[in-house]
Image: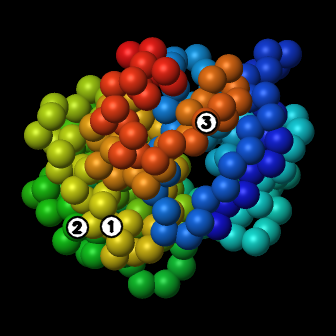
Amino acid sequence: MLEVESLRSGYGRIQILDGVSFSLKQGEVVGVLGHNGMGKTTLLRTLIGQIRATSGSITFDGKAITGLSMYRRVRAGLGYVPQGREIFPQLTVLDNLKLGEEVRRGTSAIPEMLEYFPVLKKLLDRQGRALSGGEQQILALARCLVGRPKLILLDEPTEGIQPSIVDQIAEKLSELSRALNLTVLLVEQDLHFIAQLCERVLIIQKGRIVAELPAAKLSDPAVVEEYLGI
């Protein structure tokens, strides 16, 4: 589904990604772990096209997308839920969902997503700015999913969310990945959350993937100390 080879990118003259290589199979949920400043968010932004790759290649669903615009990557089936949600605060929940659906044609997926996320049903007329952090995160995820992506890039979905909502999001993501055969690349700092969802975890340090671990290994304090120092 996704093949990344020797990917480099950054901000101006500052290089952040330094030759990242990995691959994802269809239907996999794979985590990315690393300290702040190691390149996790930059990786997702480069994959979705917000940041231009300076070298290397990205192949998605059998097609080279390295030079494509963000819009064309989304049309091809890449979805992105950024850190901080970035919903449209002045728009209602329903209008946020409608905007997410602009990338696709055909029957609306909004009714289906409201069944997956019933908490949004009673909030459809409410502005995004009036939602709690957990409700905003659920909206951001639903807004992405109504576009029917094949692969979701998910950046720090538990940030600033109360534990009960975090558990709901983990349960719903697991359900959706199976039901829709979604591939997910998940950047996250919550080890419990990432272990619940992922089969394997990529460790990123200084812009490079330095290790790949089974998610079950995250319960081993020695492994966590070796790779993350926490």
Q: CA distance from mark 2 to mark 1?
A: 8 Å
Check the picture and name the quadrant holding the N terminus: bottom right
Q: How packed is label 3: few (under 14 Cα within 10 Å), some, or many (20 or more)?
A: few
Quadrant in which residue 62 is drawn: bottom right
Q: CA distance from mark 3 to mark 2?
A: 34 Å
Q: CA distance from mark 1 to mark 3?
A: 27 Å
The residue labelled by disc 2 is 116
* Residue 31 place in picture, x, y as percent: 47, 44
Residue most extreme to the bottom: 107
Label 1 vs label 3, nearer the camera:
3
Q: Amino acid at mark 1?
A: Leu
Q: Is residue 225 above or below residue 215?
A: above
Whether residue 147 is visible: no
Assess whether mark 1 and mark 2 are in contact (beta carbons under 8 angstroms): yes
Q: Earlier in the sequence, mark 2 or mark 1?
A: 2
Q: How packed is label 2: few (under 14 Cα within 10 Å), some, or many (20 or more)?
A: some
* Residue 131 place in picture, x, y as percent: 20, 38
The residue labelled by disc 3 is 211
Identify the disc placed on residue 176: 1
Name the residue rendered at 85%, 16% in the picture.
13
